[in-house]
Amino acid sequence: MVGFKSAILSGLLASTAFALPTVGPEPLTNVGTSDPWDPASYQKTFITCPAVDRSGPTPKDIQLRLGYIDVNPTAEKTLVLAHGWPSMWTTYRKQIEHFGKDYHLIIPEHRGFGDSEHPRDLNASNTMQDFMNDMICMMDHAKASSGVCVGNDFGAQLCWEAGRARPDKFIAVFNVGIPYVTSSTMFVPTLLLSVLNPSFGYQVYLSEAPEKAAAEMDADPLSVIRATAQVAQTKVPENFLKLRDGFLQPWLEQDRQNNYTEVPFSGIMSKKVEDYMVSAYRKQGFLNTFNGYQYGNRKLTYDYDVAQGNFSLPQPTFTLFPTKDPVSNWEEFAVMLKSSDFLPNTKNATIETAHWPHEEKPEEFNKILEDWLNSDVKF
Ligand SMILES: *[C@@H]1O[C@H](CO)[C@@H](O)[C@H](O)[C@H]1NC(C)=O
Ligand SMILES: *[C@@H]1O[C@H](CO)[C@@H](O)[C@H](O)[C@H]1NC(C)=O
Ligand SMILES: *[C@@H]1O[C@H](CO)[C@@H](O)[C@H](O)[C@H]1NC(C)=O
Ligand SMILES: *[C@@H]1O[C@H](CO)[C@@H](O)[C@H](O)[C@H]1NC(C)=O
């Protein structure tokens, strides 16, 4: 049985996105990698996928034009790489280079991000199952009958749910950080989450005041991306992620105190990739990238799980725990949540990075993923 404290934590993690370290030496400045990798050299595949608009009294069938990156489509083994927030398919550039030789890679641009359309309704038309169905639509189009779901941040939550609901399509799951959270315990609203863990304050902001948050972020997408794309040794401002009515103020305050002209660049990506991300977020703005945080979407996701009634993932699973992501000690949470009780075939490892290990330590990340694919996954 899962106790009350664990139940609270389950809910707490149910809507978690990135978390960042708060201690360490001075931030790096302007040391972008000289990595020549160019996102513009990849062409997105566009398809039309069925979706549902739940804004009215009766759900309405709609269609969405969605983009994805299709790499090495004739390879037999498929990996589906699910990105997080505020992120993009480009977060997997080092996996494209490494795994793209032997694997078929399907990299969604989630609905609401970049060039992918979204339902007009933010609140209730974007459940985890909706995102999962988008991925299955892409897999069908790319002629991949099944694949391994690899996720980080929001994408990890998505891969857990996809593996749970459709083990026939997602034959194994490899996730960064966020442990599996069962819906077998109570539903916890976002406001309660931030009372329990102050660093989830930003989730209240994104869910309670999405238009205001979008206006703030649309005015300065570069700073939003820099503030979040940090590394293990970054010193993150004290109040970052804790505010419930704003996002960038702690960084702008730090800039003022240090006479910086801009939010320091962590160097986790090249300037070319950063420019691409900024322009991608300019296309549609931030508003519809907040879809995962809305009350309706979270509650309907939970209700769907409860109605299905099965809470375990029978297939091989793996959780990679970053150890310098101290707003949440994910490994400790996983133990408290008894995640592995719902994962009969699971493994894990740790990696010394902040929130984005596949970008911060790609060689180490790729080796861990590759070893596990070779030893545990039967394609
Ligand atoms: C910022 O600039 C002001 C005015 O030039 C100066 O007095 C102050 O010492 C500077 N602060 C830092 C941290 O360099
Ligand atoms: C959000 O969606 C939920 C679930 O469908 C619904 O109960 C709620 O009334 C909606 N809230 C708003 C503000 O539309
Ligand atoms: C959970 O239930 C759904 C609906 O019956 C089914 O499609 C899915 O395969 C089940 N998952 C597992 C792991 O049995
Ligand atoms: C990680 O795996 C080890 C076994 O290799 C296990 O003892 C431990 O409980 C696992 N940690 C979590 C959080 O599941």
Image (cartoon, rainbow, N blue to C red):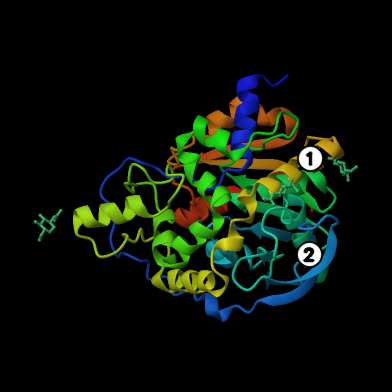
Which residue is pictured at 66% across the width and 70% down the height? 116
Say above or below: 128 vs 137: above
Q: Amino acid at mark 2?
A: Met
Question: Horizontal placement of 21 versus 286: left or right?
Answer: left
Residue at disc 2, secondary structure: helix
Along the line of sight, the residue nearer the viewer: 310 or 94: 310
Percent x, y for residue 283? 55, 74
Along the line of sight, the residue nearer the viewer: 72 or 297: 297
Q: Amino acid at mark 1?
A: Asp
Q: Which mark is residue 303?
A: 1
Say above or below: 190 vs 38: above
Percent x, y for residue 64? 75, 70
Say above or below: 92 vs 191: below
Label 2 – label 1 distance at C-alpha: 26 Å
Q: Tag 1 or tag 2, which sits nearer the N-term?
A: 2
Question: Horizontal placement of 329 versus 236: left or right?
Answer: right
Could one spot residue 27 in this view of the protein?
no
Image quadrant in which you'd find residue 187: top right
Which residue corresponds to mark 2? 139
Which residue is pictured at 79% across the width and 35% down the height? 311
Label 2 or label 1, whichever lies nearer to me, is: 1
Percent x, y for residue 361? 46, 53
